[in-house]
Amino acid sequence: MPGPQGEQGEQGETGPAGEDGTDGTNGTNGEDGEDGNANVATYTYDLSSESGATITVNATALSQEVIDNDLILGYLLKNGNTYTPIPAPIYAFALGDNSDIAVEISLNRYWMFFYEVGTENLKSVTAGQLDELKLIVIESSSTTSGKSSKANTLSNLKSAGVDTNDYYAVMDYYGLAY
């Protein structure tokens, strides 16, 4: 039978800190990949069969929160290799075949309006003149400077030397695949 419990004694002083351990190594499954950017997303829409003076893309990524807060960049791909930022004051489909392109963004919709250059007359595009639309949504951080989050994000890109008219420069900056 155990005896009566005695009073607990005082705790001693804390001992010295131990030495730092050694860094671990990467596993044998391969090397670490490049860090991604969870704050930027790219959405691609096939426009090859679209025609008309107004083209509407159903873009569910354009939630009210995204529209209100984030920077949305649009690029049209033509001939499989040339990305042009939109809206665009002059968009060349082919030699002598130019259009002005206006853009309107609303909940889950990205609207493109094609006009004769320098006029307010709508101009139809034919199927096959456009390949695809790429939308890049860049999450904006809030700011206390009074500047809107979108303007602040755009300003930060320009300060970093990123030409937002250059699709490839934007994708490279964020480390995203073309």
Image (spheres, rainbow, N blue to C red):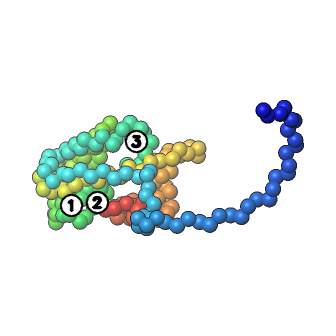
Above-or-below relation of 24 to 58: below
Asked whether residue 162 is in view, the answer is no
Q: Residue at x 71, y 64 (%)?
A: 19
Q: Position of residue 4 (x, y in %)?
A: 84, 32
Q: CA distance from mark 3 to mark 2?
A: 22 Å
Q: Circle 3 is placed at which residue position? A: 66
Residue 121 x %, y %: 19, 46
The mark nearer the N terminus, 3 or 1, is: 3
Crowding near the residue tagged with mark 2, few <14, some 14–19, many ≥20 C-alpha atoms within 10 Å? some
User: Is residue 164 left or right of 15 when viewed as pictured?
Assistant: left
7 relative to 32, above or below: above
Q: Position of residue 16 (x, y in %)?
A: 80, 59
Answer with mark 1 or mark 2, whichever residue precedes in sequence.
Answer: 1
- Which residue lies at the image location 86% right of the left edge and 49% below the top edge? 12
Amino acid under disc 3: Val
Query: Answer yes or no: do the residues labelled 1 and 2 have beta carbons within 8 Å?
Result: yes
Q: Residue at x 36, y 38 (%)?
A: 63
Q: Which residue lies under the disc numbered 1?
A: 78
Type of amino acid at the residue the image marks with label 2: Thr
Q: Earlier in the sequence, mark 3 or mark 2?
A: 3
Q: Residue 97: name its quadrant.
A: bottom left
Q: Which residue appears farthest toward the front when viewing the image?
A: 1
Q: Nearer the viewer, residue 12 or 81?
A: 12
